[in-house]
Amino acid sequence: MELEDQTAVNPTNGPATAPPAPAVVESLIEEISQIPNPEEKESLMPSEKFDVDLVVIGAGPGGYVAAIRAAQLGAKVVCVEKEYLGGTCLNWGCIPSKAMIAPVERLNHIKHADQMGISVGGEVKLDFEKYMSRKDKIVTTLRGGVGSLFKKNGVRHVEGFASFVDPHTISVEKDGKKETLKAKNFLLAMGSAAIRLQIPGLEGGRDEGVWTSDDAVSAPFIPKSMLILGGGAVGVEFGYVFNGLGSEVTVVEMMPNLIPMMDADLGTELARVLGKQGIKVKTGATLEKCEKTKDGWKCTVKKGSDTETVQAQVVLLGVGRKACTDGMNLDKIGVKLHRRGVEVADDTLRTHVPNIFAIGDVTGRIQLAHVASAEGIVAVTNAISNGSKKMDYKAVPSCVYTVPEVAAVGLTQAEAEAQGNDVTIGKFIFRILGKAMASGEIDGFVKIVAEKKYGEVLGVHMIGAHVTDMIHEGVVALKLEATLEYMVDTIHAHPTMSEAVLEAFEDATGHAIHKM
């Protein structure tokens, strides 16, 4: 509302002219009554224009966390999910794979119990039906937990596939029925799906013995033999699982090391340990072609100028994921897409459409569940408060859940050196520690990468027992820009596996006490 003569209604501004006519006064009163209360949150004001303040599309670890946080901030929230609450992480990724890893680790403990003086009578074997049933129960329990959290926080869950009508409107379809939702803001959290690489001769799906990670977590049987294409986290984790279940496993990775996105020393050590467990590791190699046989697949693996044939009942494709954006009309409403997914304008996680945000795998940035959760909190905080908080990607931990585990945060040695840093390296192996000897978990080491002049910690890299729980010491060190001086003055309990972290920090300064 704009008043041309404010002195007529506000005498404190100066002398008034002639008093306004009664009709004018009534009109002014009506207009004033429509002015919003400044103390009332704009996003919570009743509006005929929007059904809700925020619609989150996708209920994975990014989407469901974001929806709950938005509700905690006072917003009216709907979360749309086309399939299961929890997304890929809970239903086909992080959780079911870890539920498959843990029993295999226990099985191996029992098989080698005699090394600790324990005699186990009779044959030790795994009941595959109970094994998979336990995994399914864990998944359904956690899925139900997400639904309970939605109810507790007042988040409405809508099932179906969402597509945009305009930047403030979506249509949600399920089983031929459609619902239209209008929202002030949207958060894109649709996640990603496994890619089926085009290998010459390799055709078909799970029934033909061509699996993705989604198929592997619901495996109908234990294959006699398996070739895994890809030596990243997915490939090595399933390699550990099926090798432990009795499959003859070959892992093929085109890069020089396993887990190629991590420090090279970690990949080298992991290959050594997995090789001791019976897994055949072929790095610097490619799967050239496959031929269907009576018992599975005849696979031609090429390394340099040499080729060899690997027979496998199942080929598991563990390379690459694609953002789930198809059919949503994102390009038609102005959301920009790139080769890996949705493009965000900056680290506030806004897309190029100001009321639409994007997080997690769908952005093609860092495909980790905990990153998606953190991004979700930042995005909805900005959406609800019209803020400009930015994501900080400096201290993001990465974990691989083989046995031994692998964990890292910050720059690898190669990355730190490539950026022009004069680095100092600290390293300490677990086998020297009393706790490692006592528990029989002696494989692996901790490696520190630090800037030499001032001692700022640039990266922390670990392979060994329980390191996915220990890595957060490194996360905090990077987050707080800690130096070696601070870290070596931090007392660590004895006896613990974490003493290796202290010793590695001390080694980077040149005076590790227990280094042999």
Image (cartoon, helix red, strand yellow):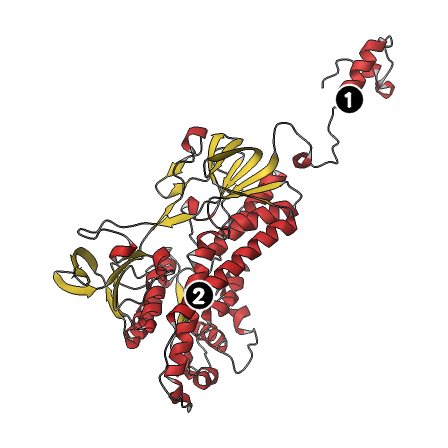
Q: Nearer the viewer, residue 40 or 158?
A: 158
- Density class for disc 2 (Cα within 10 Å; few <14, some 14-19, many ≥20) is few
Work out whether residue 471 can be spotted.
yes
The amino acid type of the residue labelled 1 equals Ile
Up-down relation of residue 184 to residue 130 (above or below): above
Q: Mark 2 points at which residue?
A: 133
Rendered location of residue 509, percent (x, y): 46, 73
| Drawn side of residue 287 relative to residue 120, left or right | left
Where residue 158 sits, quadrant-wise, is: top right
Q: Which of 438 and 414 is in front in this view?
A: 438
| Drawn side of residue 233 relative to residue 299, left or right | right
Rendered location of residue 69, percent (x, y): 61, 48
| Drawn side of residue 199 relative to residue 429, left or right | left
Rendered location of residue 449, percent (x, y): 42, 65
Work out whether residue 460 can be spotted.
no
> Nearer the N terminus, badge 2 or badge 1?
1
Q: In percent of the image, x 47 and y 32: which residue is there?
A: 164
Up-down relation of residue 1 to residue 321 (above or below): above
Rendered location of residue 166, percent (x, y): 49, 28
The amino acid type of the residue labelled 2 equals Ser
Q: In percent of the image, x 65 and y 45: which residue is there?
A: 73
Q: Which element type, helix, strand or loop, lies under badge 1?
A: helix
Q: Which of 409 and 236 is in front in this view?
A: 236
Q: Mark 1 points at which residue?
A: 32
Q: Which element type, helix, strand or loop, lies under badge 2?
A: helix
- Density class for disc 1 (Cα within 10 Å; few <14, some 14-19, many ≥20) is few
Up-down relation of residue 429 to residue 118 (above or below): above
- The N terminus appears in which quarter of the rendering? top right
Q: Which mark is residue 319?
A: none
